[in-house]
Amino acid sequence: MILFIHRKDLRTQDLAAFERIAGLGEQGLHVFIADPALLTSIRKDEHSGVHFLSQVRRLQELYIQAGRNLHILYGDPAEIVDSILGQYPVSELVVGRDYTPYALARDHKLEKKAEQHGVPFTSLPDQTLIDLEDFHAFAGRKEPYKVFTPFYRKWKEYMELFFRPPGSVLVSDLRTAELEPELSDRFRLPFVLEDYPVAEEPSIRLADFIEDDLHNYEQGRDQYGSDGTSRISGILNTGALSIRTVYQRVMGIPEGEAWRRQLAWRDFYLYQSVFDPDFYHYEQRYDLSLLDDKLFSAWANAETGIPVIDAAMTQLNETGQLPNRLRMVTAMFLTKNLLCPFPLGEAYFRLKLADYDNAPNRGGWLWSSSLGFDAAPYFRIMNPVNQSEKFDPLGTYIRRWLPQLADVEGREIHRPRPHAIVDLKASRERAIGVYKEILRSR
Ligand code: FAD
């Protein structure tokens, strides 16, 4: 029997693990573990937790429709695995590979537990389009890429040669086992999963995007007043659709190039998280004592008095959505104009973003705060008013999210309100000086 644990692969087709289990020809015990260390009591009711659990519910429905067993458990993964391996004749533990520091430590424990029970542990790369380790060897560089453009050139070369099309094994092709009621009871969820909505069918959103917006993506992606992007990041990050399936849908479409490039950005940040030893430690290299959290709550609560910032934070707080351009604008504003340390914003996005994912979120914050690899130069600070005028000239977005400003006429809609908590020009000058100091402290 194979023990398989679903993690960031909440789907029932095109899983590397399913191909392996089918190849072994054995029955599988399929579980999903809600890990309290990740799904904290706060997070489970915030957009990131709700989105994730909605995908878990959908996974549960897919198993039911296929007539197969999925066991949803709650607790420390190592303890659960220990219990299962103690009671079942498991011949292999199979998981999809995960790369965050927490995930690596967790999987190290799982591997040790498996070893104690004499069970092999197999962790299969399944989150990215390129196999990260294989790509690194293919690129043949001593130092990993730090800059996206050369990475992307090599990425395209690799994809032409080695793109692995979606696998064909469905969960209905596999035999799945029951779990002892005693184990299900011992590791029962402390909340009601049925309280969460079942996530929508992910391929519909992708199909709509390809039909309606893909051709205009390059121009439309920054026009955040009109939703020209796919909004599939949450689907990709929970693995509700496999990245291979998504890529295959847009492969070879000439006007799909700009969008495929964004899929490469996703791989790029995961690649950095694996190969840049500083990726999770940049903040420790600098003296951040010149920064503080005094203005953080005004930012988080959409009370800065800068319309586009408050509109963006309102959208984020209410829906968990935020267009990429406004992630950059709000992140720069927090770290530069308000001089708050980036980990505060990173942690806030972790709770609030429906599509939260560790590597792209950290990558985005490192870039915006000018403290990471390939970062925005510290003296190039986006001015939120100029950004708003440029990418949403009519102020459609601000009017939508701040209805109290809906009647403000013309360009005035973009301007700071009289109660704005900072002067944009003065705070920009100050930030340049402070970040110069910080970067020198390295
Ligand atoms: P589209 O524009 O349709 O792009 C398609 C896909 O490409 C996305 O779904 C995503 O998987 C990938 N992609 C697009 N832009 C980027 C990018 N800049 N970096 C990495 N991958 C990208 N993305 C997350 O998935 N989770 C996060 O937690 C996250 N946090 C971010 C925080 C900050 C401060 C910044 C600046 C960016 C962050 N991003 C994050 C990246 C990006 O903003 C989102 O991936 C994008 O807005 C998702 O919208 P979409 O699906 O409509 O993307």
Image (cartoon, helix red, strand yellow):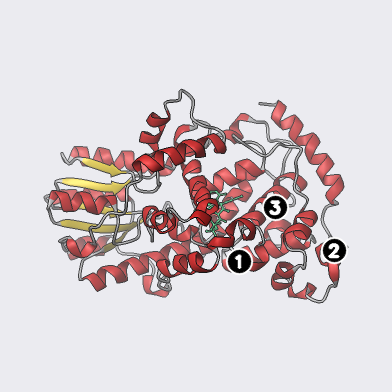
Q: Earlier in the sequence, mark 2 or mark 1?
A: 1
Question: Which image quadrant is residue 402 in?
Answer: bottom right
For the point 38% across and 55% down, which residue is it?
248
Can you tell which quarter of the image residue 9 is in? bottom left
Give 235 or 157, whichever is nearer the viewer.
157
Vertical position of residue 428 compared to residue 410: above or below: above
* Secondary structure category for the residue under label 2: loop
Q: Nearer the viewer, mark 2 or mark 1?
A: 1
According to the picture, the residue beneath numbered tag 2 turns out to be 417
**Quarter of the rendering containing residue 108:** top left
Q: Crowdedness of circle 2 by 10 Å Cα count: few (<14), some, many (20+)?
A: few
Q: Give the residue type at disc 1.
A: Asp
Q: Earlier in the sequence, mark 3 or mark 1?
A: 1
Q: Position of residue 348 (x, y in %)?
A: 59, 54
Q: Residue at x 67, y 58 (%)?
A: 300
> In this view of the protein, can residue 342 be seen by the observer?
yes
Label 1: which secondary element? loop
Label 2 is placed on what type of residue?
Answer: Arg
In the image, residue 347 above or below residue 353: above
Q: Residues within 10 Å of mark 1 (few under 14, many from 20)?
A: some
Q: Image point 61% across, 41% down: which residue?
A: 366
Q: Which residue position is annotated with label 3?
A: 329
Q: Pick whichever, 181 or 419, lies toward us.
A: 419
Whether residue 2 is visible here, answered yes or no, is no
433 vs 406, nearest the viewer = 406
Q: Amino acid at mark 3?
A: Val
Q: Nearer the viewer, mark 3 or mark 2?
A: 3
Which mark is nearer the camera, 3 or 1? 1
C-alpha gap between disc 2 and disc 1: 26 Å
- Label 1: which residue? 227
The C terminus appears in which quarter of the rendering?
top right
